[in-house]
Image (tube, grey):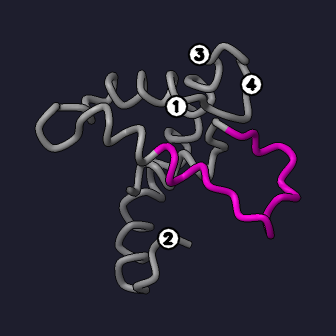
Amino acid sequence: NIVKDKKMYAAISDVLEPHYKRLRNVFKQYACHGTMADPFSIQLNAFTDFCKDAKIVDNVHCKLVDLDYVFVACNVTEKRHSYQTGNRAHSLCRYEFCEAIIR
């Protein structure tokens, strides 16, 4: 859980929860964009495309290099979680995608 403060967590949940189904569908759509076309993960290029399409990138508050940092930060899997065989390296699974949106 990246959000430690309970009030902040509740506020983020209140904002994202009504949109979760849409986020899930967006994830599926962009997962098919990658060269691996894996429906369970999004590669960096597809994540960048999503951020551009969603107008997150504005080259003032959020630059492409910032997206690279967010992607890498969300993609870190600790050894204790290495049992996640479906969670490919160098790609985001669905919960990591949601984490990237929060970041």
In terms of sequence position, does the residue under pointer 1 or pointer 4 come before the other?
Answer: 1
Tell me the quarter of the picture where residue 51 sits.
Answer: top left
Question: Picture coordinates of residue 3 (x, y %)?
Answer: 45, 74
Spatial separation of the CA atoms under disc 1 and disc 4: 14 Å
Say left or right for 15 vs 59.
right
Tell me the quarter of the picture where residue 61 sits.
Answer: top left
Spatial separation of the CA atoms under disc 3 and disc 1: 11 Å
| Residue under numbered circle 2 | 2
* Vertical comparison of 9 with 48: above or below: below
For disc 3, the neighbor class at 10 Å (few under 14, some 14 to 19, many from 20) is some
Residues rendered magenta in the picture: 71-89
| Residue under numbered circle 4 | 38
In terms of sequence position, does the residue under pointer 2 or pointer 4 come before the other?
Answer: 2
The amino acid type found where label 3 is placed reads His
| Residue under numbered circle 1 | 26
Report helix, strand or loop for mark 4. Answer: loop
Query: What residue appears at the point 83 percent right and 54 percent down from the top-left corner?
Result: 84
Q: Nearer the viewer, mark 3 or mark 1?
A: 3
Spatial separation of the CA atoms under disc 4 and disc 3: 9 Å
Report helix, strand or loop for mark 2. Answer: loop
For disc 2, the neighbor class at 10 Å (few under 14, some 14 to 19, many from 20) is few
In terms of sequence position, does the residue under pointer 1 or pointer 2 come before the other?
Answer: 2
For disc 4, the neighbor class at 10 Å (few under 14, some 14 to 19, many from 20) is some
Q: Nearer the viewer, mark 1 or mark 2?
A: 2
| Residue under numbered circle 3 | 33
Question: Between 88 and 28, which is closer to the camera in this rendering?
Answer: 88
Spatial separation of the CA atoms under disc 2 and disc 3: 27 Å
Question: Picture coordinates of residue 87 (x, y %)?
Answer: 76, 45
